[in-house]
Amino acid sequence: MAATATAVALAMRLCNALRYPPDWGYDASFNWRYIYRMSRDWALPHPSAGWSTADPPLFFTVSALLMAASDFSLVLVPLLNTLAGLVIVALAVTLVRCESPEHPERALLAGGLLLFLPAHVYMSAMVSEEMLAALFTSIVAFVLARRRRARDDGAALRAAGCAGQSGTEQPLRPMQRPLQ
């Protein structure tokens, strides 16, 4: 049963990534403009130059590299988000399995919940930095939880700081609008 549910979830995500209209989604048209502009001049735009240009550039830079390297960027960029979403699921399953090895059904439940979580499903096909931000947040949570078990507070704090600075844009959201 778990294998069937996983196969359905993977097929659904792949289908969404391949068939979801590229201009649908939160800020998709602005994000595509940012990606296209970066793929042409490889310069960061001024934060007030457009709606999405105040967001951290990691997702947009990686997407611009995909756009410059391939004619299939309309497919590859959503697949990048799909991959990020699947890594989040793998981190959750691994963490639950490590925290509760005597109850493997809990890891299956964690994976199943994330694989079919509506926001997770539709965000994984959108052209947006949100899945990458969720991935970095998940990495931080994973490392902190694993280090907590090892009682290594210094390493956990360093990992949290590094991952938090690597592209998570949630703390920057209030700064998106230029000062008046």
Image (cartoon, rainbow, N blue to C red):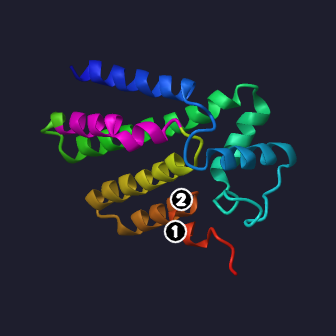
In the image, residue 133 above or below residue 96:
below
Q: Residues within 10 Å of mark 2 (few under 14, many from 20)?
A: many
Classified by dominant secondary structure, the portion drawn in magenta counts as helix
Q: Position of residue 89 (x, y in %)?
A: 37, 39
Q: Nearer the viewer, residue 89 or 163?
A: 89
Q: Which residue is mark 2?
A: 168
Taking the spot 66% from the left edge, 56% from the top edge, the residue there is: 52
Q: Position of residue 32 (x, y in %)?
A: 70, 43
**Which residue occupies the extreme left position in the image?**
102
Q: Position of residue 156 (x, y in %)?
A: 40, 63
- In the image, what residue type sits under mark 2? Thr
- In the image, what residue type sits under mark 1? Pro
Q: Are marks 2 and 1 in contact (CB under 8 Å)?
A: yes
Taking the spot 70% from the left edge, 25% from the top edge, the residue there is: 72
Q: Residues within 10 Å of mark 1 (few under 14, many from 20)?
A: few
Q: Which residue is mark 1?
A: 171
Q: CA distance from mark 2 to mark 1?
A: 8 Å
In the image, residue 14 above or below residue 144:
above
User: For numbered disc 2, what is the local secondary structure?
Assistant: loop
Q: Quadrant of residue 116?
A: top left
Q: Which residues are magenta?
A: 106-125
Q: Position of residue 159 (x, y in %)?
A: 47, 61
